Image (tube, helix red, strand yellow):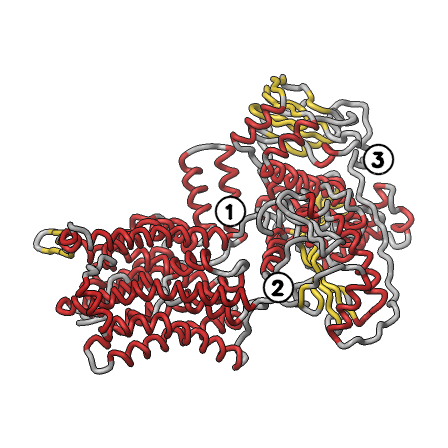
Amino acid sequence: MSAGSVPGVAADAREPMGQSAPGGRGLLARVAPLRRSLRTEAGGAGLLLVATLAALAWANSPMGDSYATFWHTEFAFRVGETELSLSLQHWVNDGLMVFFFFVVGLEIKRELVIGDLTDRRRAAVPALAAVTGLVVPALVYVVFNLGDEAVAAWGVVISTDTAFLLGVLALVGPACPAQLRLFLLTLAIADDVGALSVIALFYTEDLRLTPLAIAVLGLGLMIGLRYLHVWRGPAYLVLGLAVWVAMHESGVHPTLAGVVIALFTPAYAARREEVADAARLMRAYQQSPNPQFARAARLSIDRSVSASERLQALWQPWTSFVIVPVFALANAGVSLTGETLRDAASSPVTIGVVAGLVLGKLVGILLGTGLAVRLGLGRLAPGLTGMQLAGGAALSGIGFTISLFIVDLAFDEGQERSADQARVGVLAASVLAALLGWALFRLADRRRPSGTTRPVLLDPPVDPARDHVRGPVDAPLTLVEYGDFECPFCGRATGAVEELRERFGDRLRYVFRHVPLTDVHPHARLAAEAAEAAAAQGRFWEMHDRLFAGQDRLDPGDLLEHAAAVGLDVVRFSRDLGSGQYARRVEQDVESAEASGVEGTPTFFVGGRRHTGPYDADSLAAALLAGVGGEDALPMAPREEPGSPVLPVLGPRRREPDAVSLTRAAPLPADLEETPDRQGAYPLLTDEQLALLERHGTRRTWAPGETLFREGDPGYDFQVVLSGTVAVVEHHGHPDQRVVSVHGARRFLGELDLFSDRPVFLTAVVLQQAEVVTVPDAQVRAAFAEDHALKETVLRAFLIRRSLLLALAADVRIVGTGSSPETERLRRVAEERGLSAVVVDVEDEDDVTELLADLDVTEGDLPVVVWRSERVLRHPTEADLAALAVSSGTGATAASADARPPAQEAT
């Protein structure tokens, strides 16, 4: 598909070779979490602006006197003789704003523990810029107010309003400011740390130790609740209120209670064992719905996500859309009379605030950035220009929320006139900083050469520890391609890349990064994940070559064929692909593509700079040589061609020699338990998905004993159980029949052979009267087109089911730790004896305890070998495996050479 044929994208006449481009706006087919956060902040900034204008309009209206009267109305809580009385304005500033600072503290904790600030080198430049961005504005303010009591208000000019900053940046910033946004977000977090420290250290008066000790005790009790495994809110709410009151009485500003509590709130990445435990409890609830299981599952799900992230998700909208706008309404209402404006125009306080925020922030941030880069503490992101950085630094002069907050702290009741002058300065500085930022961005646009409206440098640079590099990692020539395995232009470009590799040999390193354009290439994302799953087994480039060679065969079943052909452990590959384990790795490549200015595929970077124009071999070679001064090419280096194994065939298992019998198997029990949803193989469909499938299919009631499809049938339709139970059985009706899975309501039958033309090798038997929706093949594809989430769920479940079936089809399953030398030795010996073997890695299992209980072994017995008949061999020797091979008739010759009595055998 050419770029010009994609809706909304025009082909560039200057690049006749063509690119695949996304059909929607923007490169990312999935919206990144960062973008969702930015939209929340920008929306909050808009509401904050409305609240500010409303406060100014109220204070300057004919009813302006009512503004001060209302917000200075006393509101008190009394308990016996004890009373806490504050004005409404102070209830907002000292009470509601606790939640704002709580969210700020949660953001700081998250960034320090699992966010951008964990990489100290990456955070060094914005962190030092934040420090100088605090110090320089304060010094500028002090210069204008030195010798006056208003000098104590220097903290008004130190902070940046992140919500306003991001909102204005979205309106006046450069076309592709991803690097700048990340820089400013990191700077804002460091800025918040500094501002909160200033409030705690310099704006605390009349410190009283007894209430402070009570506040510390309350914090200690909150920490203790965690170790007592108390996770619910009421206990924390009571202690939080007590800490707030104690800090208010101690003289420390009570809003800092929110920051301190947030910093003690646990923050961590989701832990696999807790997610698995939550899944296990959810399965228990599905199988036996009752209040106890419901509560246990709910608590387990809560614990699987850190309290910090849950609380931030809960309170962020409230602070952005309610609390901060109410704060602006209570604090921004300055009476802008002619006298007030004349006083402000000549007031050192107003001038100091404006100069500090508008000029001090700009100079301070640029100074810190330059120092950090010059001292080698870090580097700026590629593509971020100095003028763009200056524009962002200017916008950081929008102090607003915390500036108005510190005005209330810095001036006493007798200094209301100076406080109003400071508020006028904050409002004026916010407008001027926005205008200055806009002017600098426009100047940056004018200075940018024609045709470079988007980043041209590779971001991040090639990292051999992370990137897929073909060729010596220290080669002098570097070619990076952003590609899509389903893109026809990328497929053609592989020939040019191969020609370059032949021409330059070890002088060239070639790097491939993913940009799956999922809106125009529906198979591209799963193919990219398949390449990463192959990389986990050391076969990225073999899979890369095969996927491009078979661009018309990228369905899930085809991907398994490719995996077998390049020699992968297909069971592990199928499980990894079905679980979505490498989806985030692909998304990181997509994010880097956006930061690097990629707008379609293929896009090449030569020596770290985006290549424009034709990408035939000669054009790319000329660009490569131009970057290093025209060095001579080297002869082609010989390469070995990979072998071509084949995918294991699924079908009837080989049976034990004595298993053939004319007797029929006993009927299946009707009360078989439903198979747990291990690893996502048997998910439940939602009400919406069931309704969609019913629209495309037909509903029918099936009696116990009837079969929905049988072994040997030429094919079957997609079927969903609405009620009752259905068992999927291997060798149904034979003495060695085996139940593979049992499906209840909301579960769908089948696996990848649904989309193939091979005969069916399993049988679906109704155990309890069942209502089933049957959807023909063409209608299934139509339903998938309507609901991509349904398609994703079904295909990933089919992949995981295939991995489980491949494990069942093997002669032996070796249960142990995948990285164990003994496990690997047993696998190798089994294959030498002609036995098909798969490794069941206990580290990849959701519930190891259940697995070991099913086998009746302990962790100390591992690794164990499970034979086809489910017989378990503990601590097996080579002789044991040789005996199994002889009994199966597959390895008699190999076994006879060294057959000996088994060292240890158990059943």
**Nearer to the camera, 414 or 575:** 414
State which tag comes first along the sequence, 2 or 3: 2
Secondary structure state at the residue bearing disc 1? helix
Mark 2 or mark 1: which is in front? 2
Q: Which residue is mark 1?
A: 277
Identify which amino acid the numbered label 1 is placed on.
Asp
Instruction: Using the image as rendered, state which of residue 653 and residue 441 is in the foreground.
Output: 441
Instruction: Answer with left or right where residue 3 lies relative to residue 195.
Output: right
- Residue furthest left in the image: 81
Q: Which quadrant, please, contains the N terminus?
A: top right
Where in the figure is residue 703, as x and y percent of width and height? Answer: 63, 17
Is residue 239 visible to the viewer in this orientation of the structure?
Answer: no
422 in relation to 874, above or below: below
Q: Nearer the viewer, residue 51 or 12?
A: 12
Residue that carries the numbered disc 2 in the rendered image: 450
- Residue 734's disc is none
Residue 467, image quadrant: bottom right
Disc with the residue nearer the chain's start (1 vs 3): 1
Residue type at numbered disc 3: Pro
Mark 3 neighbour class, 10 Å CA radius: few under 14, some 14 to 19, many 20 or more = few
Residue on which disc 3 sits: 657
Quote the CA–CA distance across marks 1 and 3.
42 Å
**Could you tell me if residue 696 is visible in this image?**
yes
Residue lying at 75% horizontally and 45% vertically, measured from the top left: 812
